[in-house]
């Protein structure tokens, strides 16, 4: 386990570094001078040079990269060109919306998907087993923003029970208010996410239900629930955990779209605005934060998977970037 | 495998073909006939469904059915273009990694993991910023994001095939590596790969719709379903058809393609048949 931990951590560090390089280069590849964002139309060459010097784009690329890495290691993500406010605190303020949205939606999706997926597998031959499978088939084909629009139509416009969008100015000062405005976005994301989760839970459960060890346990006199608890659950949960990691990351990033539907002041809205205004530090900061988050979630999911599955632990080192990651 | 089992399985395939075929037919018809010219704003604004505008009009007075039909074209182009890019780049990369030495393989795998961690929507924003907001930019971004997933799958499949005895036998009897790839590797990985590409097609259609919804897809003359939805969102109370119709078609297309994938998997890849 220690050897694996070391290897996996080394891999994480390399990944983070490479991701930083890729982000840095991609943003530099974008045509157009970021300095223009600072200047009005018809600025003199001197002004352009001054602006470039101010934001440091007149220096050679490797030098820019090193100083950028240095700033990042001090958690300094630079300042917005447009508002001149530091990007880091702004992102932190936005996370107050995005992180609860992601986590609540994730929890709700798991709460929906685990029992439904289990039932769909356990009752695979029956009509409601088929209905559950068909519903999840439908769910993975629905665009998340459309679900949001439909929910707004029903619950905000027709029934008028929940707000159609927005978030309290004072954030979580009144948790009830904040939760009310997050209800529809959370349900939207959770519905779409649970659809794909249900399929994984269903197939993992089917594998377990058809397994020899479960039959043996039953033959030795375990009750069905006892056998599922002792043997079934532990086996079914392994593939599901690796999927959960990916799904959590997807939800976090799907926030871009969902936050637009509900006009939530989260990371997604900030990013869309950053692109519209060519505000490079903002774009760069958000991309760094989200890519790093996704990589860290993957790291955590791998470790959890190792902890719960001794078979993976035995193959020391193992395949780092293997099939399931 | 009993005969009784086979019937519902091919039913999946047929249902998928019918649903996806419906959208394909609409797209094909749109090339020859449209109810109204795409930029005809002669209708009243936000008309309800009726005659002559079967589905009503949007907030600029354009015929919704016309836009919907063009949208079918855009959706299929987005799916096909992304799968083409993602499939070609991914297959090449995956084959390279599958054949590469340990060191190169590890490097490629690590790069793929990072690329996969990089979300499609963010990649698309970068490509859009580098080029312009267009269907082409969206397709390139979705295709590139997809290629990492395809490459990783290809790599695993290739490794699995290369470990088989018949490859060693084929090599010992003097077959060159390129011929091994064409004669043994590709036919063996194709069933699983094609199913995955079909699923990726559906995901690409959804991704394009999301990008268009955010204003990063095809610009106005091309009616993408995602952009239609975004434009109709504000007037959902007065003209619900604008919100319902494009969404329903999106779901029909993606469900259809996913069903085809499921059906093909059951027919073409007997090892994945699930017994219970």
Image (cartoon, coloured by chain):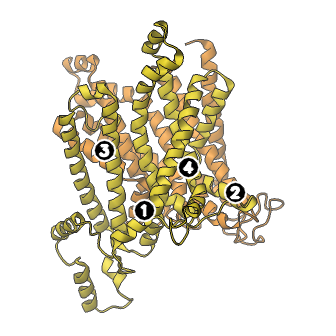
Chain colours: A yellow, B orange
Judge if badges 1 and 2 mark residues of a common chain.
yes
Q: Which mark is residue A95?
A: 1
- Cβ–Cβ under 8 Å for marks 2 and 4: no
Say what secondary structure mark 4 lies in. Answer: helix
Say what secondary structure mark 3 lies in. Answer: helix
Badge 1: chain ID: A
Quickly name the residue at label 3: A299
Badge 2: chain ID: A
Q: CA distance from mark 2 to mark 3?
A: 38 Å
| Label whose residue precedes the other's in the sequence (1 or 2) | 1
Crowding at dot 1, Cα within 10 Å, few <14 / some 14-19 / many 20+, comes out as some
The quarter of the displayed image where residue A301 is located = top left
| Label whose residue precedes the other's in the sequence (2 or 3) | 2
Q: CA distance from mark 3 to mark 1?
A: 21 Å
Q: CA distance from mark 1 to mark 2?
A: 26 Å
Crowding at dot 2, Cα within 10 Å, few <14 / some 14-19 / many 20+, comes out as some
Observer-nearest of A10 and B275 = A10
Quickly name the residue at label 2: A155
Relative to A302, say whether B129 is above or below. Answer: below
Relative to B145, say whether A276 is above or below. Answer: below
Quickly name the residue at label 4: B76
Residue drawn at point x = 54 percent, y = 31 percent: B262
* Residue B35 appears in view: no
| Label whose residue precedes the other's in the sequence (3 or 1) | 1
Q: How far across and how far down the image is residue A261, in percent?
A: 57, 62
């Amino acid at each position: 386990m220690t050897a694996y931990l070391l290897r996996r951590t080394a891999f994480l560090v390399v990944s983070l570094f490479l991701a930083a390089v890729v982000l840095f280069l991609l943003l530099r590849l974008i045509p157009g001078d970021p300095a223009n964002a600072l200047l009005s139309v018809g600025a003199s060459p001197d002004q352009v040079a001054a602006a470039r010097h101010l934001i440091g784009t007149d220096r050679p690329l490797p030098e820019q990269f090193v100083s950028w890495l240095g700033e990042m290691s001090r958690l300094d993500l630079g300042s917005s060109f447009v508002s001149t406010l530091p990007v880091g605190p702004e992102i932190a303020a936005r996370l107050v919306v995005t992180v609860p949205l992601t986590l609540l939606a994730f929890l709700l999706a798991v709460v929906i998907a685990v029992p439904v997926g289990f039932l769909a597998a356990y009752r695979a031959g029956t009509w409601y087993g088929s209905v559950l499978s068909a519903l999840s088939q439908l769910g993975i084909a629905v665009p998340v923003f459309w679900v949001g629009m439909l929910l707004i139509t029903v619950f905000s416009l027709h029934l008028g029970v929940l707000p159609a969008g927005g978030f309290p100015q004072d954030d979580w000062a009144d948790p009830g208010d904040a939760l009310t405005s997050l209800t529809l976005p959370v349900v939207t994301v959770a519905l779409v996410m649970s659809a794909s989760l249900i399929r994984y839970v269903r197939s993992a459960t089917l594998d377990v239900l058809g397994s020899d060890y479960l039959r043996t346990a039953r033959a030795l006199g375990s009750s069905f629930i006892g056998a599922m608890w002792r043997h079934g659950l532990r086996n079914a949960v392994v593939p599901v955990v690796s999927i959960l990691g990916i799904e959590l990351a997807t939800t976090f990033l799907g926030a871009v779209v969902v936050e637009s539907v509900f006009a939530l002041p989260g990371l997604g809205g900030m990013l869309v605005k950053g692109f519209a205004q060519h505000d490079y530090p903002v774009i760069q900061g958000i991309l760094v934060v989200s890519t790093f988050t996704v990589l860290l979630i993957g790291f955590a999911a791998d470790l959890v998977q190792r902890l719960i599955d001794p078979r993976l632990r035995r193959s020391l080192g193992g395949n780092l970037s293997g099939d399931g990651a | 495998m009993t005969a009784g089992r086979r019937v519902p399985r091919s039913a999946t395939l047929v249902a998928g073909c019918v649903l996806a075929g419906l959208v394909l037919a609409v797209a094909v018809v749109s090339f020859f006939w449209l109810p109204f010219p795409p930029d005809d704003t002669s209708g009243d604004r936000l008309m309800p469904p009726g005659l002559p505008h079967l589905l009503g009009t949007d907030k600029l007075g354009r015929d919704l059915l016309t836009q919907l039909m063009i949208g079918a074209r855009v959706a299929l182009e987005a799916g096909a273009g992304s799968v083409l890019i993602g499939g070609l780049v991914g297959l090449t990369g995956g084959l390279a990694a599958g054949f590469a030495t340990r060191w190169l393989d590890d490097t490629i795998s690590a790069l793929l993991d990072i690329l996969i961690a990089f979300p499609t929507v963010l990649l698309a924003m970068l490509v859009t910023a580098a080029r312009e907001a267009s269907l082409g930019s969206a397709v390139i971004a979705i295709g590139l994001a997809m290629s990492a997933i395809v490459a990783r799958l290809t790599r695993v499949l290739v490794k699995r095939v290369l470990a088989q005895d018949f490859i060693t036998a084929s090599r010992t009897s003097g077959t060159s590596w390129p011929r091994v790839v064409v004669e043994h590797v590709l036919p063996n990985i194709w069933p699983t790969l094609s199913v995955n590409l079909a699923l990726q097609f559906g995901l690409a259609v959804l991704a394009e719709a999301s990008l268009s919804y955010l204003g990063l897809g095809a610009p106005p003359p091309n009616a993408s379903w995602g952009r239609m939805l975004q434009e109709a969102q504000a007037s959902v109370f007065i003209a619900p058809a604008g919100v319902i119709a494009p969404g329903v078609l999106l779901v029909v297309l993606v469900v259809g393609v996913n069903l085809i994938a499921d059906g093909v998997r059951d027919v073409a890849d007997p090892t994945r048949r699930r017994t219970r």
